[in-house]
């Protein structure tokens, strides 16, 4: 399975402003100067931009839309303004993604699931070009009985130049019941009602490889064990939980009955349900990227008090999360913290090709979160290291001033020897020795 975000905002689209773009450019150039980035080297510039996270990019301004790819079957969840971006991608015959589904020449088929029909979850559908191509077909699954009528009404002549019945694609509606299992390809899709005005529904997509839960637009007013049990059970052991983090905890208490939640409540839910990865989603349209990153840092800090907490990320437009047999079975974990202006990271489990993207993302996020460029990487709990893992370590080394490897088990050290890469890194016996070495080379000394 492959999960991808096409729209991550709530309420209404919120494109980045010219002022915010200018601030990002100023901050990025200042940081490049501090790190002595060679701006004439395209590879160095690209690596630097990747390391900036939301400082150099943006969470995105489109409203809710996600896709899940099941081999050759495409699942779409909600049709906020992000579905227009999806449609443009599917209509580009030059991309591998579009060629996989063939919507551009009338051979495409997708299944579209609606969580509910609030404006930010349907407003992109009139601009979804694959529905304008004859030969394409769409099965629309919904729990609310009014979904077909609402989609037609938003495209009436008084409000939109193209009416719903003018779509050239074949469109079939399927009303389902809460909790009903929909079997598509090799996956089972189930649902649960969420606490939101007019009712919204979460979806769980599960097969033998992995489980994804999309739980946007929900308020958790009563947080006691009994009242959160049904949600914990629905989220249980999910590889990915996409969670409504529109409000702060304080706001969620004050704005009762608005139907939204917070990152820290999602953190509690994810940890209690043994979720592997938590993605903060449905960002408030007034929240800047800086504010969203602050929420991410605070959520990770909050979870750091627990053993083996879920990994937490910000959902960003264009972000892809591959999930499959190799990834689902992997025990690879990462944690990080800052001490003496040095990032301490610990790796656990099998460092193979299925987790290199996860490592790169977490490594670059840690650099930005902690605003540091010296890293001590503890590998004593690493059980396996492949060439893909070494490649990721080499790439990571290029993004920092210092990268020290410590606690290498004999077999891991031997893999580095066999690859001829031991001289690529500073290798120390333990963290204390590495800390002393890095401190001795500190610019302040």
Image (cartoon, helix red, strand yellow):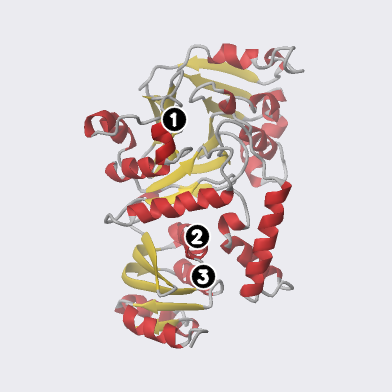
* Label 1: element kind: loop
Q: Are marks 3 and 2 in contact (CB under 8 Å)?
A: no
Q: Residue at x 58, y 37 (%)?
A: 285
Question: How far across and down, in percent of the image, does residue 323 sit?
Answer: 44, 47
Question: How far across and down, in percent of the image, does residue 388 sit?
Answer: 48, 66
Residue on which disc 3 sits: 396
- When the figure is inspected, residue 241 is found, relative to residue 47, above or below; the finding is above
Residue on which disc 2 sits: 365
Badge 2 or badge 1: first in the primary sequence:
1
**Left or right of 401 on screen, residue 383:** left
Badge 3 or badge 2: first in the primary sequence:
2
- CA separation, marks 2 and 1? 31 Å
- When the figure is inspected, residue 144 is found, relative to residue 313, above or below; the finding is above
Q: Residue at x 36, y 59 (%)?
A: 332
Q: Residues within 10 Å of mark 2 (few under 14, many from 20)?
A: many
Badge 3 or badge 1: first in the primary sequence:
1
- When the figure is inspected, residue 362 is found, relative to residue 243, above or below; the finding is below
- The circle on residue 192 is none
Question: How far across and down, in percent of the image, does residue 330 sit?
Answer: 35, 55
Query: Can residue 329 be seen here?
Result: yes
Q: Give residue 44's quadrant in the image.
A: bottom right
Q: Are marks 2 and 1 in contact (CB under 8 Å)?
A: no
Q: Are marks 3 and 1 in contact (CB under 8 Å)?
A: no
Residue on which disc 1 sits: 255
- CA separation, marks 3 and 1? 43 Å
Question: How far across and down, in percent of the image, does residue 246 sit?
Answer: 48, 37
Query: Can residue 1 be seen here?
Result: no
């Amino acid at each position: 399975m492959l999960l991808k975000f096409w729209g991550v905002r709530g309420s209404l689209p919120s494109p980045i402003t010219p002022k915010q773009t200018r601030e990002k450019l100023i901050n990025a150039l200042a940081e490049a100067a501090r790190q002595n980035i060679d701006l004439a080297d395209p590879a160095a510039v690209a690596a630097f931009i990747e390391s900036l996270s939301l400082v150099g990019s943006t969470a995105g301004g489109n409203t809710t839309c996600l896709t899940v790819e099941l081999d050759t079957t495409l699942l779409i969840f909600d049709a906020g303004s992000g579905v227009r971006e999806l449609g443009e991608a599917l209509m580009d015959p030059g991309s591998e993604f579009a060629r996989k589904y063939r919507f551009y020449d009338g051979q495409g088929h997708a299944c579209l699931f609606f969580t509910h029909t609030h404006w930010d979850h349907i407003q992109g559908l009139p601009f979804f070009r694959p529905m304008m191509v004859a030969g394409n077909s769409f099965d629309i699954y919904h729990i609310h009985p009014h979904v077909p009528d609402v989609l037609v009404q938003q495209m009436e002549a008084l409000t939109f130049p193209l009416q719903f019945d003018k779509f050239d694609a074949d469109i079939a509606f399927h009303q389902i019941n809460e909790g009903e299992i929909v079997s598509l390809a090799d996956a089972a899709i189930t649902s649960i009602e969420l606490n939101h005005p007019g009712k919204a529904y979460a979806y769980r997509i599960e097969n033998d490889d992995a489980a994804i839960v999309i739980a946007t637009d929900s308020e958790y007013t009563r947080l006691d064990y009994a009242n959160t049990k049904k949600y914990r059970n629905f989220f249980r052991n999910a590889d990915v939980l996409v969670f409504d983090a529109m409000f702060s905890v304080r706001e969620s208490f004050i704005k009762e009955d608005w139907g939204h939640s917070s990152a820290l409540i999602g953190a509690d839910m994810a940890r209690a349900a043994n979720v592997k990865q938590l993605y903060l989603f449905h960002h408030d349209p007034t929240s800047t990227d800086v504010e969203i990153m602050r929420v991410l840092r605070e959520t990770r800090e909050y979870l750091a008090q627990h053993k083996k907490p879920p990994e937490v990320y910000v959902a960003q437009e264009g972000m892809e999360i591959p999930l499959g047999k190799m990834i689902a079975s992997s025990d690879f974990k990462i944690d990080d913290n800052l001490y003496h202006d040095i990032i301490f990271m610990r790796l656990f489990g099998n460092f193979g090709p299925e987790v290199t993207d996860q490592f790169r993302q977490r490594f670059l996020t840690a650099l930005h979160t902690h605003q540091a460029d010296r890293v001590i990487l503890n590998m004593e709990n690493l059980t396996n290291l492949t060439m893909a893992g070494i490649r990721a370590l080499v790439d990571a080394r290029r993004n920092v001033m210092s990268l020290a490897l410590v606690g290498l088990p004999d077999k891991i050290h031997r893999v580095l020897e066999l690859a001829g890469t031991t001289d690529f890194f500073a290798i120390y016996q333990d963290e204390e020795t590495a800390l002393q070495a890095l401190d001795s080379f500190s610019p302040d000394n």
